[in-house]
Image (cartoon, rainbow, N blue to C red):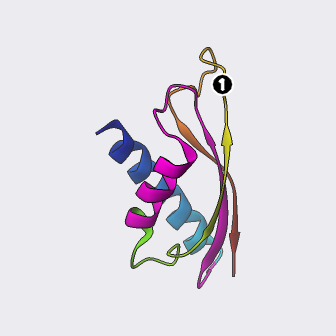
Amino acid sequence: MHEASLMRDLMRKVMAVAAGQNASRVTGIRVRLGALSHMTPGHFQEHFDEAARGTVAEGARIETLEDNDIRSPAAADVVLESIEVE
């Protein structure tokens, strides 16, 4: 359930940014997948699609960057790099 925890944290951030910008829709996000996050881009997409269903982030385009540095302080995390909103 590590993935579920990462996704809840990410969605809280996405929704906070969207609300802070009075966005009607999140059109895209860029995330960095930590080397120890146990997430591949495809796996992340599946979890994101499920978590975003029914929210302003539903259907957002996703760009994933993979970090292979297991010593990185964010190696176990999914880091929100940027967000695009309307």
How far across and down, in percent of the image, does residue 52 sit? 44, 68
Which residue, given by chain and number where applicable, does mark 1 sit on? 68
Task: Name the residue located 50 percent from the left edge and 25 percent from the top edge.
Answer: 36
Q: In which quarter of the image is the N terminus?
A: top left
Q: Provide the secondary structure element on which disc 1 rests.
A: loop
* Number of numbered discs on residues: 1
Report which quarter residue 70 is drawn in.
Answer: top right
Asked if residue 20 is positioned above or below residue 7 in the image, the reply reads below
Q: Which of 7 and 68 is in front in this view?
A: 68
Left or right, 30 with reference to 1: right
Task: Name the residue located 62 percent from the left edge and 14 percent from the top edge.
Answer: 71
Task: Name the residue located 41 percent from the left edge and 55 percent from the top edge.
Answer: 47
In the image, farthest residue toward the top? 71
Q: Which of 83 and 42 is in front in this view?
A: 42
In this picture, which residue range is highlighted in magenta?
Answer: 22-50
Disc 1 marks a residue whose amino acid type is: Asn
Asked if residue 65 is positioned above or below residue 84 in the image, the reply reads above
Crowding near pointer 1: few (<14 within 10 Å), some, many (20+)? few
How far across and down, in percent of the image, does residue 20 sit? 60, 70
Asked if residue 38 is positioned above or below residue 62 in the image, the reply reads above
In the image, farthest residue toward the left? 1
Report which quarter residue 21 is drawn in.
Answer: bottom right
Q: Which of 18 and 40 is in front in this view?
A: 40
Asked if residue 37 is positioned above or below residue 73 in the image, the reply reads below
Magenta region includes residue 30: yes
Magenta region includes residue 80: no
How far across and down, in percent of the image, does residue 37 sit? 48, 32
